[in-house]
Image: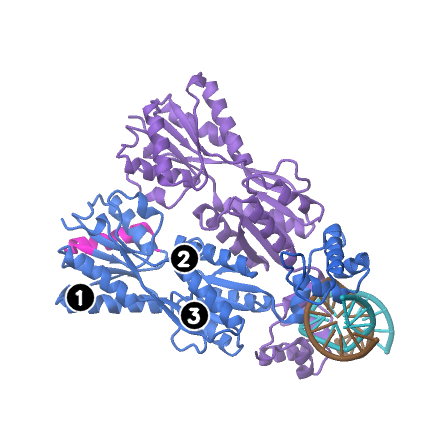
Chain colours: A blue, B purple, C brown, D cyan
DNA sequence: TTGAAAGCGGTACCAT
DNA sequence: ATGGTACCGCTTTCAA
C-alpha cells in the first residue's frame, strides 16, 4: 500500500500550518477565488495548488471522529431489488449527492433480525441519520434507537409509538377510496383484496380502508381478503386467483407492486382475460405495467416525492433546523385498461 | 445529542484498561466462552457484561483511522434503479453482510463526471475496495485510481488497459453466438441489432460478435445496427422499430434489458405480433419478461454469479489473498416464445 | 495476563 | 492572517 498523502504533507508543501490547510479546505471558495474565511487569497491559492499537486484526499473518518459528524445517511428499505424501493433509493442518492451526504443502503428483507443487524452496523459507522422502511415486527429492533437521539425518518410505513421520529407516509385511506370507487363505478361489486400476510402499518391501513369503502357501498357481504405469504411462488398466487375467481370475484384490489406483478403473471398463466374475467387496480408502479397487454390501472405514489420529503426532513432534523414531523402524501389513480367496465 | 458511550466508559465500568477492552472486543469468542487471546475468561466476561450494560457501540471511524481499514466496499453501477444492477447489488450486499463488510452503493448514471465524483467520495470515505461498472468514457475518471493501489474489480464492462484490476465479464462472443444461432435456426435471416450508442466495451463486443455471426452464415448483406440514445423516449424507439420493420427486418437482437423492455413496449404500441411481425432475443432479464404475452427469449447472465465472483475477487484482493484476475462467465439462452419459428 | 502511552489524520480553540 | 496544540475514540506497540 502506497503511503497516503495527509494534511501534514500538504501543509509542508505549501509552507503553512495544518490548521490553515484545514481552514481553507473547509471554507467555500467563491467564484472570485476568494474563500469565505480570513485567509489571504494568495495563501489559499498556494494551499489549493499543493493539494492538487500532491493529489491529497481528505480522510473523512479522521474528520468525523473529531467533529462527531460523518455526513453519512443510512437508507434501509425492505428490498433494494424491488423497483419501488430502488427508485426511491436512486432519488435519495441524487439529492444526497448534491447535499454533500453519502448514502449507505441496506435491505431488511422484511426480517426484523436482519433489520436489527443492519441498524447496528449503521450505528457503528456513525451515520448522522437514517431513513427506514420498518420491517414487520421491527419495533424491538428500532426501539433501542429511540434512546440514542439519532434522527430517524420512517418511510411508507409507520411505527406508531416511536417517539421523535419523522414520518413520510401515503394517505392510505385516500388510496382505498380511489381504488374501490374506480372499480365500483366501473360496475364491479364483488371486489376482493389481496395483501401480504405481514404485520405492517401500511397493510393494516389498506385492509381497514378496503373494508370501510366496501361497507360504505353496502358491499360488506362481499368483503374478502386474500392473504399471500411474502415471497410466495407463482403457484400459490395462481391458487389464490383460482379460488377468487371460482368464488365469483369480479375485481381485485392489489396492494403492492410485487403482488400486482405476481397476479398479472398468474392471470396470464391461467389464460384469464382482463378485465372480462377479472378486473383489477394495482399499486405503486413497476416497469411491467407499461408493457402489459391491457394496461394496468394502479394507485401511484410518487417515488420522487417520497424520496424528496424523507430526505429533506431527515437533513433538517440532522442540522437541527426542524423537529420531526409527519408528511402525508396523496396517492393518484392512474386509470387504464385493467379497471374498465365491460 | 446524548453523549455516546466510549471504550473508556466500558473500561472504567469493568475496572480494566481500554487496551484490554479493545483486545477482547476484537477477538473471537469461542463457543466455550473462551476468547482466542490471552485474557482471563472471567475478565473477558466482565468486559462483555459492561459492554452490554452500557450499550456500547464501537466507533468504526475511530477504529479505521488507526487500523487503516474501513471495512467498507463501494459498489458503483450505472443505475441502481435498473433491476439488473439492483439485483446484483442486493446479492453483493448479502455476501458483504456475512463477510463483515459494509457496502456503499452509488450510480454513475452512465456519466463519467458523476462517476468521477462518486469515486472521489468513495476515496474520501476510505473504502477498502471498489466494484465498478465503468461508465462510457470513464477511463479518465478511473485512471487516477490506478496509482493509489486500491483494489478494484470491473464488473460486466472492461476498461482494457487498466492495470491490476480484477475483471468479471460475460463471454459476449458466446452470447452473440447463442442469440444469432437461435434466430437463424428459427428461420430468420434479416436479423438486426439494437444497441445503445455508448462507448462501452460490452457494446462494442456485442456489435462485433453480431457481425461475425452474421458473416459466418453468409448474411453480411443483412447486417444492420440500430443505435439508440441512452435514455431514449418511447417515441424514438417506436421510430426505430418502424424503420426496421419497413426495411424488412424479421428479427431483432436486443442487447440490454432496458432496450428489450422499451422495444417490447414499442411493439405493443405499434400493434405488432410477436414473433409473426417481429421476432427477438432480449438480454439480461427483467421482471417484465415473465408477464409479457408471448414470453420473451433472452440471453441470461446470472446476477447472482456476477455478484459472487466480483465480491469474492475483491475481498481476496483486499485481504491480499490473491492477485487481480479475470473471470469470464457464460451466458445462457432462455428459449421462449419471442424467437419461435412461425 | 494486563496497562501505559504513542499515534492515526484531522478539527477547533487559543494564541500570536 | 496564521500557527500551536489539545483532543476525538480507538488500535497497537512495548513494558510490566
Left or right side of B87 for B41:
right
Res B126 visible: no
Q: Which chain carries label 1?
A: A
Q: Residue furthest front?
A: A32
Q: Mark 2 lies on which chain?
A: A
Camera-nearest residue between B293 and A325: A325
Left or right side of B24 for B210:
left
Of discs 2 and 3, which sits in the foreground? 2
Of discs 1 and 3, which sits in the foreground? 1
The residue carrying mark 2 is: A304
Q: In the rendered image, which quarter is residue B128 located in?
A: bottom right
| Residue A146 against residue B321 in the figure, above or below | below
| Residue B318 image point, x, y percent | 66, 52
Cα–Cα gap, marks 1 and 3: 31 Å
Circle nearer the N terminus (1, 3): 3
| Residue A130 against residue A185 in the figure, above or below | below
The range drawn in magenta is A232-251
Left or right side of A110 for B113:
right
The residue carrying mark 1 is: A214
Q: What element carries label 1?
A: helix
| Residue A226 image point, x, y percent | 25, 61
Cα–Cα gap, marks 1 and 2: 31 Å
Give the residue displayed 76% in from the left and 60% down from the top. A43
Q: In the rendered image, which quarter is residue A331 located in?
A: bottom left
Packing grade of label 2 (10 A; few <14, some 14-19, many >=20) is: some
| Residue A138, label in figure | 3
Give the residue displayed 44% in from the left and 22% down from the top. B223
Which corner quadrant holds the N terminus of chain B? bottom right
Amino acid at each position: 500500500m502506497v503511503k497516503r498523502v495527509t494534511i501534514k504533507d500538504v501543509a509542508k508543501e505549501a509552507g503553512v500550518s495544518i490548521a490553515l490547510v484545514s481552514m481553507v479546505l473547509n471554507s467555500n471558495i467563491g467564484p472570485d477565488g476568494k474563500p469565505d474565511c480570513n485567509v489571504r487569497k494568495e495563501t489559499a491559492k498556494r494551499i489549493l495548488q499543493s493539494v492538487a499537486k500532491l493529489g491529497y484526499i481528505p480522510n473523512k473518518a479522521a474528520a468525523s471522529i473529531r467533529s462527531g459528524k460523518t455526513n453519512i445517511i443510512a437508507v434501509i428499505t425492505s428490498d433494494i431489488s424491488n423497483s419501488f424501493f430502488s427508485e426511491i433509493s436512486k432519488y435519495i442518492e441524487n439529492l444526497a449527492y448534491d447535499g454533500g451526504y453519502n448514502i449507505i443502503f441496506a435491505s431488511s428483507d422484511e426480517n426484523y433480525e436482519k433489520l436489527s443487524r443492519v441498524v447496528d452496523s449503521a450505528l457503528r459507522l456513525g451515520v448522522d441519520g437514517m431513513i427506514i422502511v420498518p420491517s414487520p415486527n421491527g419495533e424491538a429492533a428500532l426501539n433501542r434507537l429511540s434512546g440514542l437521539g439519532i434522527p430517524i425518518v420512517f418511510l411508507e410505513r409507520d411505527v406508531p409509538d416511536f417517539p421523535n421520529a419523522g414520518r413520510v407516509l401515503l394517505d392510505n385511506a385516500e388510496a382505498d377510496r380511489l381504488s374501490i370507487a374506480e372499480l365500483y363505478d366501473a360496475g364491479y361489486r364483488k371486489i376482493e383484496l389481496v395483501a401480504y400476510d405481514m404485520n405492517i402499518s401500511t397493510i393494516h391501513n389498506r385492509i381497514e380502508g378496503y373494508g370501510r369503502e366496501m361497507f360504505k357501498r353496502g358491499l360488506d357481504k362481499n368483503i374478502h381478503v386474500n392473504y399471500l405469504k411474502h415471497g410466495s411462488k407463482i403457484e400459490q398466487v395462481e391458487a389464490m386467483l383460482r379460488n377468487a375467481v371460482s368464488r365469483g370475484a369480479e375485481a381485485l384490489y392489489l396492494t403492492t407492486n410485487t403482488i400486482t406483478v405476481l397476479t398479472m403473471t398468474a392471470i396470464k398463466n391461467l389464460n384469464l382475460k382482463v378485465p372480462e374475467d377479472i378486473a383489477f387496480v394495482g399499486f405503486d408502479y413497476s416497469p411491467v405495467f407499461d408493457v402489459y397487454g391491457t394496461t394496468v390501472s394502479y394507485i401511484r405514489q410518487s417515488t420522487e416525492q417520497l424520496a424528496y420529503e424523507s430526505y429533506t426532513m431527515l437533513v433538517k432534523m440532522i442540522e437541527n433546523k426542524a423537529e420531526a414531523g409527519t408528511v402525508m402524501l396523496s396517492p393518484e389513480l392512474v386509470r387504464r385498461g385493467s379497471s374498465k367496465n365491460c
